[in-house]
């Protein structure tokens, strides 16, 4: 970690400069992320599920001077090399690969990049107001939003989650979800904070995961609902004791009440659910509250305050409105997006700043939060966020498409999956399935359309906005086993 930090400094990286990490989950990826942080640079984790053009958009938007990459993902960078505007000479660093002898791909392997530097502590003094990371909430080619977090906010994140979930020296954390996601950090950060042991699985394998929980004495782990659902359906938790496990944490989307009851029946009072958003606000439903509040997402973490807003007014218990939070763990800003930052902030009569979530919810008399609708029109599939605007932009670029809307429909395994609704230009001749395949070739793996339907029109209000709520109701009963492309 120190060696990488010193190598970045030797290559000209300064405090606050952007260094991107595009890496599959591994110890090398973890070292790259925190080595970057120790150099004083802002670490920018990039999703491995994005398309190459989306990766280029983020690299250019954040102005990354270096990109640290694993061999399996280098093709995403190589495909858009001419588009990259800020990477410096020698700034393409392979974490686990080197160019073949005589090749001129421009990648430097880690040994070459770090040659001549030692493992002493980097000569960098960092404070609470220095930038720790920039996490992108979307890979859209239009205007992606990079969420800027400071060292103080990330320290609070580790401390608050560590305290709430009983992390202590000797903790053994296990993660199988991608290191670039905020949910994974719910285990990574507290484990490292207390000097524990972090187990990283490159990919999720249900049997390996369950075996590791027992064999490695795991105390804390994180899983998304689709993973937990599969464990229940396949009976993999039956007859298992997990004697060292203290916390099984889930986030990303709610676990269904009946599934939660089955899970708790198998593992006991060790199940926690977290609701949060990349910008930093979060609530936690603790084991002792699961039975009485099965549909709630809990109460704010220590040090956070949460209100429900309706047209700038703070709502009372039972009233629905937009969720807004304040506390030491929130974002500083959206990188380079003053307009978006201003729009996200609400101030009360005393001038205190709250960050709007975009989610609709309500509080009960005891202060427990209930989610009524999710952030704008975002789709959550297998714990991953999918922004319909990204998919709609790709579909709209096809010359046959006149109008488009993407909504989420129920999926028995992934909770939701994207459904594309398309109106063609008069006289255009293309089959729904052909258009779906065309679009999916231009989307990230997690964004791909499961179904696409051709329609004659889309419902709109007086201002011309597509009425997505009506469409979601219309397609509530859409069958997952329906044919991928169809016309209606």
Image (tube, rainbow, N blue to C red):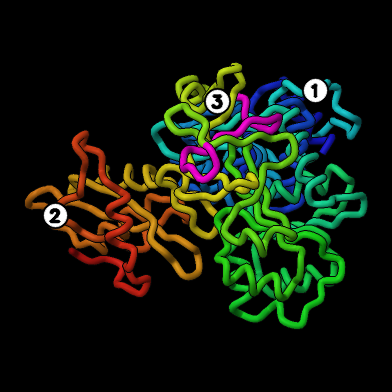
Residue 206: x, y in percent? 66, 72
Residue matched to label 1: 126
Mark 3 touching mark 1, by CB under 8 A?
A: no
N-term mark: 2 or 1: 1
Could you say which is closer to the camera, residue 242 or residue 274? 274
Could you say which is closer to the camera, residue 277 or residue 145? 277
- Cα–Cα span, label 3 and label 1: 20 Å
Instruction: Assess disc 1: are there few (<14), some (14-19) or many (≥20) residues with their C-alpha within 10 Å of its C-alpha.
Output: some
Lateral position of residue 60 relative to residue 158, left or right: left
Residue 214 drawn above or below residue 405: below
In the image, residue 332 lies in the stretch drawn in magenta: yes
* Residue beneath the point at 80% across and 39% down: 159
Residue 434 drawn above or below residue 90: below
Lateral position of residue 375 relative to residue 66, left or right: left
* Residue 182 appearing in the image: no
Please state, as top left, top right, bottom left or bottom right, where the N terminus lies in the image. Answer: top right
Dot in front, 2 or 3: 2
Picture quarter containing residue 14? top right
N-term mark: 3 or 1: 1
Mark 2 touching mark 1, by CB under 8 A?
A: no
Lateral position of residue 208 relative to residue 453, left or right: right
Instruction: Assess disc 2: are there few (<14), some (14-19) or many (≥20) residues with their C-alpha within 10 Å of its C-alpha.
Output: few
Residue 206 drawn above or below residue 457: below
Residue 376: x, y in percent? 42, 42
Residue extending farthest to the left is: 427
Picture disc at residue 335:
3
Highlighted magenta segment, given as a residue range: 316-334
* Residue beneath the point at 29% across and 72% down: 483
Residue 254: x, y in percent? 56, 58
């Amino acid at each position: 970690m120190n060696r990488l930090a010193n190598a970045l400094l030797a290559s000209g990286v300064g405090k606050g400069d952007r260094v991107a990490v595009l890496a599959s989950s591994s110890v090398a990826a973890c070292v790259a992320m925190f080595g970057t942080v120790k150099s004083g640079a802002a670490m920018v984790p990039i999703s491995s599920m994005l398309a190459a053009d989306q990766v280029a958009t983020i690299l250019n938007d954040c102005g990354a001077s270096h990109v640290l990459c694993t061999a399996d993902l280098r093709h995403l960078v190589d495909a858009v090399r001419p588009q990259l505007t800020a990477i410096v000479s020698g700034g393409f660093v392979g974490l686990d690969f080197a160019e073949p002898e005589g090749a001129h791909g421009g990648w430097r392997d880690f040994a070459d990049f770090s040659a001549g530097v030692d493992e002493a502590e980097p000569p960098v003094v960092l404070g609470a107001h220095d930038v720790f990371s920039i996490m992108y909430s979307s890979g859209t080619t239009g205007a992606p939003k990079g969420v800027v977090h400071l060292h103080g906010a990330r320290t609070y994140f580790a401390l608050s989650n560590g305290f709430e979930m009983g992390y202590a020296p000797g903790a053994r954390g296990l993660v199988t979800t991608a290191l670039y996601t905020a949910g994974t950090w719910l285990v990574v950060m507290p484990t490292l904070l207390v000097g524990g042991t972090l187990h990283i699985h490159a990919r999720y394998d249900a049997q390996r995961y369950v075996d590791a929980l027992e064999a490695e004495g795991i105390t804390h782990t994180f899983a998304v609902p689709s993973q937990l659902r599969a464990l229940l359906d396949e009976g993999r938790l039956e007859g298992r004791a997990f004697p060292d496990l203290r916390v099984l944490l889930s986030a990303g989307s709610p676990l269904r009440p009946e599934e939660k009851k089955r899970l708790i029946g198998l593992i006991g009072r060790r199940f926690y659910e977290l609701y949060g958003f990349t910008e930093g606000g979060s609530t936690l439903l603790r084991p002792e509250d699961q039975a009485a509040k099965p549909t709630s997402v809990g109460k704010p973490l220590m040090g956070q305050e949460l209100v429900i807003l309706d047209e700038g007014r703070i709502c009372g218990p039972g009233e629905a409105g937009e969720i807004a939070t304040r506390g030491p763990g929130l974002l500083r800003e959206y990188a380079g997006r003053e307009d978006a930052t201003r729009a996200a902030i609400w101030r009360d009569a005393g001038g205190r700043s709250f960050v709007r979530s975009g989610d609709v919810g309500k509080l009960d008399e005891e202060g427990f939060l209930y989610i009524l609708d999710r952030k704008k029109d975002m789709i959550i599939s297998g714990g991953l966020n999918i922004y319909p605007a990204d998919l709609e932009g790709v579909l709209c670029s096809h010359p046959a498409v006149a109008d488009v809307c993407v909504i989420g429909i129920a999926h028995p395994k992934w909770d939701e999956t994207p459904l594309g609704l398309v109106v063609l230009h008069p006289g255009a001749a293309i089959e729904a399935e052909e258009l779906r395949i065309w679009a999916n070739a231009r989307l990230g793996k997690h964004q791909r359309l499961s179904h696409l339907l051709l329609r004659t029109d889309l419902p709109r209000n007086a201002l011309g906005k597509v009425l997505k709520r009506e469409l979601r109701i219309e397609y509530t009963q859409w069958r997952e086993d329906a044919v991928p492309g169809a016309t209606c």
